[in-house]
Image (cartoon, rainbow, N blue to C red):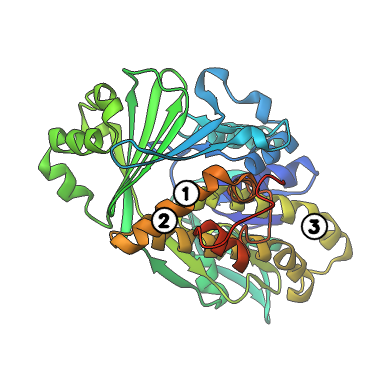
Amino acid sequence: MTERTDVVVVGAGGGGAVLGLALAQKGLGTIVLEQASGPPGGLRGEILQPNGQQVLARLGLLDKLPSKAVRSVRYFHFCRAGGAHLCTVDYEMLPPPYNRAVVTLPNVAHHVILDTYEQAALGGLRHGTSFKGLRRDGSRVTGVWAEQQGKAVEIEATLVVGADGARSKVREALGIPGTLHLYEDGYLIGLVDQAEALEESLYFVGRGEILGVFPAADRKLYFFLMIPAGSYEAVKAKGLPALCETLTRIAPDLGQTFRNLTDWSQTAYMPTGRVRTPRWVADGALLIGDAAHAMNPHVSQGRMQAMMDAMTVADLAPEWLARGDMSAGTLAEFERRRRPQVTMLQRLADEQVVFWNTGNPVLMLLRDRVFRTLDRNRRLRYAVLEATAGLRAQPPFSVWDRLVAGGFVPDFSKDRV
């Protein structure tokens, strides 16, 4: 038996879930396939940047996030490992109402999106369903083959969307080459009870060291510590006291809070990678999110960009369906709209990897000079914040700005935004 729908989405992650809901709210038939047996659990860092907040507002969900699980943060302070101040970024520089970062407890926003989608498209969310292949009519994709609880499932769709992550099987089935670059460093994530009341976010950089801490709701504190890729088990083998000692050395004022780290279940490991593909579309199908363009988390935009992809597809899809045209040439409008910002953010993240992750003394000196320049230069600080907030598609720095940021030339318009 073959099911029929307008759009089938493979993957119910940050982009796929948003797309399913946005299309359902427009009255389009959608089915979202997810290989996991249920909604996501476990520990992960959750920061909603302003562009992500805008997406949730458009979906009518921003005000539905449970207040007990959400915390707004205005200031991000960048410091040297050990505590010396380098730079402060104030989100209130951005236009209201989206002039804060929003920290949520794990998976809160995602569960709200999935719950709302299930209400809007009864039976549309299929957990425990694995993608097996694409249906085709010549070169045109016409649906998917899947497996649910050991049974073969055939779904005919006018549009197939691959939202199945950096190692996308949909991308592979489409024959779209993807270059997956795995970074040398990953992150140990933790969530602990606060001992010292922390109202603002702190980001520490040192010699080959990065530690970020973010206040969360319910007097919790997120932290993420850069560690060599794949070394999580080795870190665990050294024991919690060694980890707490490292955290306290980098952020001495939070020593009491780090002592609340008493079990490895309070931690998780996040690998980092980047995906680049020459194209995101084919006849009858397209890729969104990490399947098309995974990026390093330094720019804090990976999930936000998947959400932006989803909303762009949802804005364009009704016209595509009305015209009955799902050719690659038509779907390329999605890529034309989204690729400039994505490319800029991927490049910005890679530059930050070079300078922020470094253990090279010369690069460290230049990195710290840039941070101190940003602290004095309102114009450049605003440009960087706009990029992090997902509110610009152009690079934050020109060649001249790079010279200014490095402290090599003066900036007579440093207070102009």
**In the picture provided, is 198 more to the left or to the right than 303?**
left
Q: Residue furthest left?
A: 238
Badge 3 element: helix
Q: Residue at x 59, y 43 (%)?
A: 125
Look at label 1 and name its amino acid. Phe
Residue indicated by mark 2: 367
Q: Residue 98 or 384: which is nearer the viewer?
A: 384
Look at label 2 and name its amino acid. Arg
Query: Could you tell me how far apart the alpha carbons at marks 3 and 1 are, in whole angstroms?
Result: 40 Å
Q: Residue 15 or 5: which is nearer the viewer?
A: 15
* 147 is higher (above) or lower (below) than 276: above
* Residue 101 appears anywhere in the view: yes
Mark 3 or 1, nearer chain start: 3
Q: Residue at x 59, y 77 (%)?
A: 278
* 16 is higher (above) or lower (below) than 213: below
Around disc 2, counting alpha carbons within 10 Å, would you say few (fewer than 14), some (14 to 19), or many (20 or more)? many
Res 1 → quadrant? bottom right
Q: Which mark is residue 371?
A: 1
Around disc 1, counting alpha carbons within 10 Å, would you say few (fewer than 14), some (14 to 19), or many (20 or more)? many
Q: Mark 1 touching mark 2, by CB under 8 A?
A: yes
Q: Residue at x 27, y 53 (%)?
A: 207
Badge 1 element: helix
Q: Mark 3 touching mark 1, by CB under 8 A?
A: no
Q: Which mark is residue 316?
A: 3
